[in-house]
Image (spheres, coloured by chain):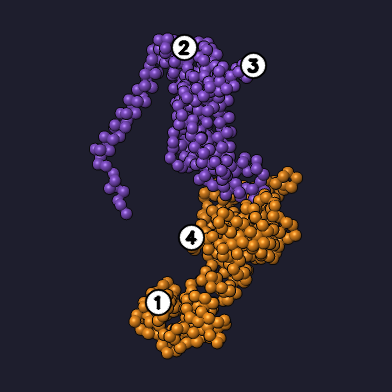
Amino acid sequence: MADANALDPPRWLRALLILSAVAVMALLVLLPLAVVLGSGFAGGVRAWYAALSEPDALAALRLTLFTAAIVIPLNAVFGTLTAWALARFEFRGKRVLLALIDLPFAVSPVVAGLCLVLLFGNHGWFGAWLQAHDVKILFARPAIVLATLFITFPFVARELIPLMQQQGSDEELAARSLGAGAWTMFRRVTLPNIKWGLLYGVLLCGARAMGEFGAVSVVSGHIRGLTNTLPLHIEILYNEFNSTAAFAVASLLCALALVTLVLKFWLESRHGDALASSQRRH
Amino acid sequence: MQLHLQGLTKRYPGVAALDGVDLDIASGELVALLGPSGSGKTTLLRVVAGLLDPDQGRVLFADTDATRLSLRERNVGFVFQHYALFRHMTVAENIAFGLRSRPRARRPDKATIARRVRELLQLIQLPEHGERYPEQLSGGQKQRVALARALAIDPSVLLLDEPFGALDAKVRVELRRWLRTLHEQTGQTTLFVTHDQDEALELADRVVVMRNGRIEQAGPPEDIYRAPASAYVFDFIGRANRLRGAVEAGHFGLPGQSLALPAEGRGEATLYVRPHDLALVAPHEGVSARVLATHHRSDRIVVELAVEGQERVLEADLPDRADASLPAPGDTVGLRPRRYRVFAGG
């Protein structure tokens, strides 16, 4: 057997590698974060607060939370169902379905947004019908929710599929053989086994739902106070050279991201064994 | 409860996993399904459990046709090779699961469930382990908990899928003796799958040897071991030496050897003999053979032998005694089968 130490690089090389990794992280992650916070508070706490409590900003925050509140539960349910179907059953077209789950990751968000325009726009497939029935999807909340739903779909399913495959179906079969109904089995055996993985997927899904820009930008219409989410609001402020306000709002998004990171770190350190042991993809 | 399997057939593209299996199991019987992988034994168990639907045939629990009943409705106790304990529940919660999952009308009250769990913990000799989690138990303990969990629902039959397959050799032997005792206490009709001949022979009232989806031979362990019905069973059930020859006028003879042993049939045949049934005698008293090598094993001495005209090397087991005079490589000795079977064909 090879000596494990034989693979260790010399001390100076190790130090150099670690230092350069830290430097890159500092340059690419910490520095921008510091700039965001610094610029956000450049006008003082009062200006920061004013930028956040301005009606358009509050409306954007509300829309972002509204979207997340719809998208996260839906994707948690759809993701769990999809993962269950793919991990437990053999059927025709399974591989195609597996590949399709990754589509939102593979395709550019702008293209995803344009697809919605093509479907629901005035000249789109359902445009005439929607207009006739006075249903507004594009440039309104429904399109924003739909776009976000599409973009964040893979997170839960992708986390659960390898986890459920790895755990196998024996425990579920055992529950059935002991007389448990489908719902009892799901509630008392399946769900407890995947709960940390599910939470992890929901966390990533939520982070992305609140930060999504590209697809939402295409379908939102940028109506201030109505169809602007936080990321869109930041862009508008920035384009109007109101960078202090832009960075103030950005600091809010950063705070949301930090909370997500801390929760993710906690989950990985506490319940790492209950997450899919295959390599992380995000 | 008796179990009747009638004409069970299950086909997968290109192979018949089960090919018309008939088997009757008496109430309280402990039956082993024995065979190599791919012989259909696990498929048969899964069909009985309701994990798989047969293409043809029926599964009867006593007089009730259970063929179309789901896994949940059959009320069988199924024990998995890898335990399949609920990892987030304590041992006691695992055992109570089946009773707690019953519809409200048939669910015992809390005190009754608790009492039943205590009884079962006593039965599996883990009275102090109720509050532990599965990951805190050893493999053998886990499998005992899995058994208790299956017994808790008073199953009509107990089905065990390679129950000792994931355990190391020593625990395996202990656990199967314990299972035998447990079976004598509970009298539960039990069907278990194994590919380990020793396990099947030691544990079961009746051994069913399977091959290519069919039953090759079924009978008490002594019969299976002493009187294998076919070359396949002889080969599978233990170590075997093969000598090719022919049967003529009621005697089996080897080409170029004077030895003739009583045998039935006619024409080309193969004599099967176990290494410990092959006695070493003076060269002129038996089949003349040349010693190739001797090996010391933990509990015996194995002599490798070559017989002229035979392709295969033979093995003879000698008891490991200090005073035994061992033949040296190159010696010529005589071989006399004490107990043997002759099957037609090469």
Residue matched to label 2: A51
Q: Which chain is disc 4 placed on?
A: B
Mark 4 or 1 closer to N-term? 4
Closer to the camera in the image, A93 or B183: A93
Relative image position of residue A272 (x, y in whole percent): 47, 40
In the displayed structure, does residue A266 sit left or right of residue B26?
left
Asked if badges 2 and 3 are on one and the same chain, I answer: yes
Q: Which chain is disc 2 placed on?
A: A
Residue matched to label 4: B168
Relative image position of residue B62 (x, y in whole percent): 73, 60
Residue matched to label 3: A132
Q: SS class of the residue under badge 1?
A: strand
Cα separation, mark 2 vs mark 3, equals: 40 Å
Cα separation, mark 3 vs mark 4, equals: 73 Å
Relative image position of residue B9 (x, y in whole percent): 63, 59
Closer to the camera in the image, B15 or B151: B15
Relative image position of residue A166 (x, y in whole percent): 50, 45
State which mark lies toward you, 4 or 1: 1
Density class for disc 4 (Cα within 10 Å; few <14, some 14-19, many ≥20) is few
* Above or below: residue B237 compared with residue A70: below
Q: Is residue A85 visible?
A: yes
**Residue B304, disc:** 1
Asked if badges 2 and 1 are on one and the same chain, I answer: no
Q: Specify the quadrant that holds the N terminus of chain B.
A: bottom right
